[in-house]
Image: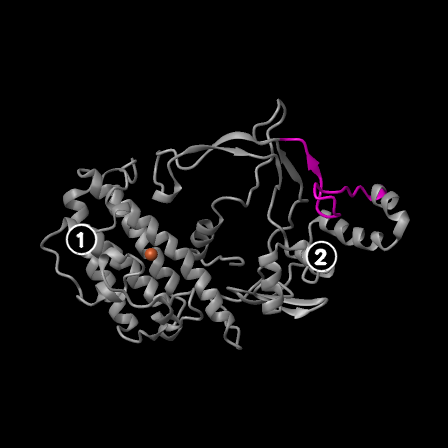
Amino acid sequence: MEPACLLTHPATGPYASGQAGQHDRYDAVRSTSTALAAPLSPEDCQVQSMPDCSPVKWHLAHTTWFFETFLLTHFHPPYTMFHPQYRMLFNSYYNAIGAKHPRPQRGLLSRPALSDVLQYRQHVDGAMHDLISRLGGNDPAFDALLELGLNHEQQHQELILTDVKHMLSCNPLKPAYIAPGSAALPPGTPAGWTRYSGGITRIGHDGRGFGFDNEGPAHEVLVAPFHLADRLVTQHEFLAFIRDGGYKRPELWLSAGWDRVCAEGWRAPLYWEGQRDDWRVFTLRGMQELELQAPRHTRQLFRSRRLRALGSRAPAARSRVGIRRPPTGRPGISRPRQHAGKRPPGPAPRPCPQRLGRPRAAIRRHVGMDVQRL
Ligand SMILES: [Fe+2]
């Protein structure tokens, strides 16, 4: 018996239009997974670097298991399973499906070999195309599960990249996943704060297009007023946080976070290596220097730190260079804007250009061999 969340997932399409669209979309998603594994050796694909990560080989098999288990065996009675024990080996957390191999021990699965898993994918892909030709566009339950399986595989594509990065970072050779090169991003724009006035707002999936079952239903929530930076923090800004004692001051952390800082000896973000003024960061391109090109406003941050050392003269000096205080009252990236989520009349807030879509955009770039810094 399949989990209720899968079989009751509403068919809220349209998804890929018609059978031709479903065939194309299926091939596009599935081929992206194998393209992500292409730069890796079979040995790379075997490693599980920590219990929260999975081997690439397991990701490739598990996403295939999903289509075999929830679509082919359910909608395609003549289907012959590739290997009956794969149902247990590549089950992740669906208790209703039966026994599963323990997650922390996925790296122990030296068999099946990577070549067997790739054959498994081909076997399932052939049967899936037969099934799409028979049911695609004609059975809303099938269409919904097909779309769920494709979105599930895209989730695992993101996990492949994050797990590969951690796995390679554990190797003293610090191998690059893709060709070494500059990971520097274009110079950032100065960060600003956007003020949202709060109020009753609607969140959650509204039923149009695909949504996972834990993203709905849409409902109203009361949101307190808040400020949000209009872009992600840069490496230089994080370096300023470190230099300002960010990992030594408990008042900057929630209790659980500070406990973790102390217990694990954190002094920089994961993947940063070095000390004081000589930091490097591990990326999928291998070890990289920190981005040299700091946004103009970040350079003001460094200046603000120096100005704070001037004591009582600092506020006036800060005023001269145009540095203001953020909503927290601490010097930092701040250029307050008077916009709001449910806001009074006025110009629309500047959207955070990096807030949505970056992981999958990064995967698309990778297929063109252009991952910057995942
Ligand atoms: Fe999964």
Give the main secondary structure of the magenta stretch. Answer: loop
Q: Find the magenta span and give its range.
A: 320-339
Badge 1: how crowded within 10 Å, few (<14), some, or many (20+)? many
Query: Is residue 130 in sight in this rendering?
Result: no
Can residue 322 be found in the magenta stretch?
yes
| Circle 1: element type | helix
Q: Describe residue 280's horizontal placement relative to residue 92 as left or right.
A: right
For the rendered model, the colour scheme is one colour
Q: In which quarter of the image is ligand 1?
A: bottom left
Circle 2 residue: 240
Circle 1 residue: 72
| Circle 2: element type | helix
Badge 2: how crowded within 10 Å, few (<14), some, or many (20+)? some
Above-or-below relation of 287 to 256: below
User: In terms of depth relative to the viewer, which is nearer, 30 or 103?
Assistant: 103
Residue sticking out furthest to the left: 78
Q: In x, y percent, where is residue 133?
A: 16, 45
Q: In x, y percent, where is residue 48?
A: 40, 70
Q: Quarter of the image holding residue 134?
A: top left
Which label is found at residue 134? none
Q: In x, y percent, where is residue 237?
A: 68, 54
Q: How far apart are marks 1 and 2 (CA)?
A: 54 Å
User: In terms of depth relative to the viewer, which is nearer, 233 or 244?
Assistant: 244
Q: Describe residue 105's horizontal placement relative to residue 231 as left or right.
A: left
Q: In x, y percent, where is residue 259?
A: 60, 62
**Residue type for callout 2:** Ala
**Residue type for callout 1:** Leu
Question: Who's the residue at 53% across and 57% down the image?
Answer: 372
Q: Mark 1 or mark 2, which has the lower sequence index?
A: 1
